């Protein structure tokens, strides 16, 4: 297995304490970048080897220093080329500090190159690189050292890259004293103006990079470099199938993963992850109930095999026949259909597979396969496939898309959903509704908005895309690596805020490139051309009418309660009694109860107690119903609905019923009823 070798050369001199923003210095940004490289190498179980050299430090520890001269002084090889382990990760995270000394970047590069030469006898690297992280403040400009670096880079075929707070474009800016700063101190590589000495060092190192086929990167551009150190996680050796069409035609094929969704790998327990290799690794299991109470899982007798039916787990008896469908490995083409019948939103799964003829099957198989693919391409048809990976997997349906170029003739396989997997959503047909038909101006505005948000657009051929997926990796994976590394090396520390991490900064800059004045102006024009109005559904209208009706009834009840006995007598004499109120109703329970209770008071009969008990039972039922309705309404309404006091009106109505019941219980001296 051919390995890759990488030696990092880090400047820890006094000028590296310069702040980029309020919280981050040059050195801290360099440490973050080194951590990203080291973490990815470690957690992807890479066998590549990394070394670390620092210059501008207090100590001197390298083989080129003679013990007395200033050459190669303050340069230390703190980590020899080796596989990344916890010791290196801990050193990078916790032990790199700024010194009050200025070292020589050329000395640091020569020490790194010499380490490659010394290590050459032990290992053979497929690729060798040196990455220098500096702010260009320390360089001797020694011609002899420059020539030695050039010879070593060419002789050993080593690539040289440089990472700094500045970019090559900064050379074209007007040279000003280092004390002068820009007004915007939050910019990453432009917070400080370059000095004449820094510009000279930048040009010098840039020339060395060009000789060694390397590049010069700013902190903002570093992620494009780091993406080259992300190991390819998809290592597909190919899966062989017999592709069948009908009962008689079969072709041996190989399925290779073309591209796949980037997901964190499940870490395998290897020595690289263990600080103490002699410690036995054990798997802990715990079972949690629905209320999150942890219970010990003693042995297998505590568990029962079951399948999930809805939200219910149905136990499977040991004698029960397996419910799994018995299948065999296959790759059957069920038929062909026009490409227009397979819509892009049908594509599912997390990968695309490339189907090729089995190279071990001979030229006849390859010729037959190529002819079939070309025929599919010319007829513009896709193949519909039933695929089973092995006897333990479930069948899946997919489509075969022909791909024909001068270099390649193959099929691409993408998964398709079954009918049960599709969620059918019925939408209104706006094309037949004239009032929703957009005009030409509105359509033009939406087109302009789409163009302004297009991250792949190029104004000319030389311009780069706003977002290049080849040079931007998954920030989720990087955040996971960062969290695991910090928790392992500093268990008591809190996880840092990802907003300040270089990965998130890079993504934020991509977003800022589309959140420009042009996009904002288009959005304002769209807001004017597409006015919004509140859409009230029919059920909502009925509910609002009911709410208004309830408010009016409550108002009438309050007025009725406030009436004194003289007003009530007037109402009774004026004809309310003619309504023949015989029981307490739900529309106006307070009024009904008051009328019936007054009739009992005025009659003064022996049956008064029984009659009062009867109307008390009636109003008690109404009080119960009103209060339950208020609780039901409270559960169904959102916060906006609660503001109109609808729910509280039901409760208030029930309280008024209780008040009037208490009033007449005292008046008739029937306290027990209340």
Image (tube, grey):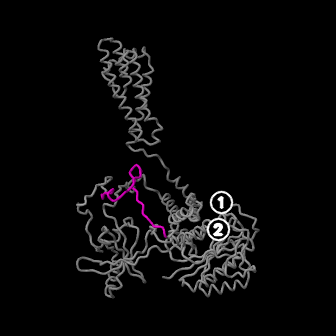
Whether residue 172 can be seen here: no
Residue 179, quarter of the rendered image = bottom right
Q: Where is residue 489 in the image (x, y as percent from the top left)?
A: 56, 64
In this picture, is 224 found above or below 147? above
| Residue at x 40%, y 25% (from the top left corner) | 658
Q: Which mark is residue 96?
A: 2
Task: Tell me the magenta residue range.
Answer: 278-307
In this image, 75 relative to 314: left or right?
right
Which secondary structure, mark 1?
Answer: loop
Dominant SS of magenta comes to loop
Marks 2 and 1 sit apart, C-alpha to C-alpha, by 17 Å
Mark 2 element type = loop
Residue 128 percent location from the top left of the image: 57, 81
Left or right of 366 on screen, residue 493:
right
* Of the image marks 2 and 1, the number of the one nearer the N terminus: 1
Residue occupied by mark 1: 23
Is residue 295 in the magenta section?
A: yes
What is the x, y in percent for residue 447? 50, 62
Q: Tell me if residue 270 comes above or below residue 404 in the rendering.
A: above
């Amino acid at each position: 297995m051919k390995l890759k070798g990488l030696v990092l050369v880090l400047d820890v001199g006094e000028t590296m304490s310069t702040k980029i923003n309020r919280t981050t210095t040059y050195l801290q940004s360099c440490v973050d970048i080194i951590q990203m490289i080291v973490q990815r190498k470690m957690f992807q179980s890479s066998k590549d080897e990394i070394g670390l050299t620092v210059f501008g430090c207090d100590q001197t520890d390298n083989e080129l220093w003679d013990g007395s001269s200033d050459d190669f002084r303050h340069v230390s090889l703190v980590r020899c080329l080796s596989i990344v382990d916890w010791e290196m990760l801990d050193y990078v995270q916790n032990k790199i500090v700024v010194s009050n000394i200025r070292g020589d970047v050329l000395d640091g590069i020569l020490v790194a190159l010499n380490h490659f030469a010394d290590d050459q006898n032990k290992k053979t690297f497929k690729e060798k690189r040196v990455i220098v992280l500096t702010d260009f403040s320390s360089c001797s400009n020694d011609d002899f050292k420059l020539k030695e670096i050039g010879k070593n880079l060419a002789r050993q075929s080593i690539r040289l890259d440089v990472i700094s707070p500045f970019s090559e474009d900064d050379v074209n800016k007007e040279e000003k004293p280092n004390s002068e700063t820009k007004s915007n101190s939050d910019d990453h590589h432009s917070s400080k103006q370059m000095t004449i000495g820094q510009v000279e060092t930048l040009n010098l190192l840039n020339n060395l990079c060009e000789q060694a086929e390397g590049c010069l990167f700013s902190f903002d551009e570093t992620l494009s470099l780091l993406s080259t150190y992300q190991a390819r996680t998809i290592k597909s050796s190919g899966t062989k199938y017999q592709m069948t069409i009908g009962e008689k035609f079969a072709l041996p094929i190989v399925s290779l993963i073309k591209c796949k969704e980037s997901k964190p790998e499940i870490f395998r327990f290897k020595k690289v992850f263990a600080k103490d290799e002699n410690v036995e690794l054990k798997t802990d299991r715990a079972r949690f109930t629905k209320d999150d109470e942890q219970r010990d899982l003693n042995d297998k007798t505590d568990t029962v095999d079951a399948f999930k039916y809805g939200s219910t787990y149905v136990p499977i008896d040991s004698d029960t026949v397996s419910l799994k469908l018995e299948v065999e490995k296959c790759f059957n083409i069920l038929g062909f259909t026009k490409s227009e019948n397979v819509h892009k939103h049908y594509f599912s799964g997390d990968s695309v597979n490339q189907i090729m003829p089995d190279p071990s099957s001979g030229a006849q198989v390859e010729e037959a396969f190529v002819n079939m693919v070309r025929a599919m391409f010319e007829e513009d048809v896709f193949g519909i496939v039933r695929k089973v990976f092995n006897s333990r997997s479930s069948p899946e349906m997919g489509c075969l898309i022909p791909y024909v170029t001068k270099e390649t003739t193959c099929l691409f396989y993408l998964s398709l959903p079954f009918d049960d997997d599709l969620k059918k959503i019925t939408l209104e047909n706006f094309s037949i509704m004239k009032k929703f038909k957009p005009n030409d101006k509105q359509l033009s505005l939406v087109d302009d908005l789409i163009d302004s948000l297009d991250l792949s657009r190029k104004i000319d051929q030389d311009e780069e895309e706003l977002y290049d997926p080849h040079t931007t990796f998954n920030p989720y994976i990087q955040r996971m690596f960062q969290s695991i590394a910090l928790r392992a090396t500093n268990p008591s520390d809190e996880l840092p805020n990802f907003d300040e991490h270089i990965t998130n900064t890079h993504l934020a800059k991509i977003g800022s490139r589309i959140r420009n004045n042009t996009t904002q102006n288009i959005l304002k024009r769209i807001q004017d051309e597409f006015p919004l109005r509140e859409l009230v559904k029919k059920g909502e209208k009925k509910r609002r009418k009911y709410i208004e009706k309830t408010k009016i009834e409550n108002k009438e009840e309050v007025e009725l309660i406030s009436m004194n006995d003289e007003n009530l007598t007037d109402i009774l004499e004026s004809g309310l009694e003619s309504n023949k109120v015989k029981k307490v109703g739900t529309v106006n329970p307070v009024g009904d109860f008051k009328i019936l209770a007054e009739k009992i008071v005025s009659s003064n009969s022996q049956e008064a107690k029984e009659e009062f008990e009867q109307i008390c039972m009636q109003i008690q039922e109404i009080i119960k119903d009103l209060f339950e309705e208020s609780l039901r309404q409270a559960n169904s309404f959102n916060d906006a609905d609660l503001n109109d006091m609808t729910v509280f009106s039901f409760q208030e109505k029930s309280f008024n019923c209780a008040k009037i019941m208490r009033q007449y219980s005292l008046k008739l001296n029937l306290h027990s009823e209340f």
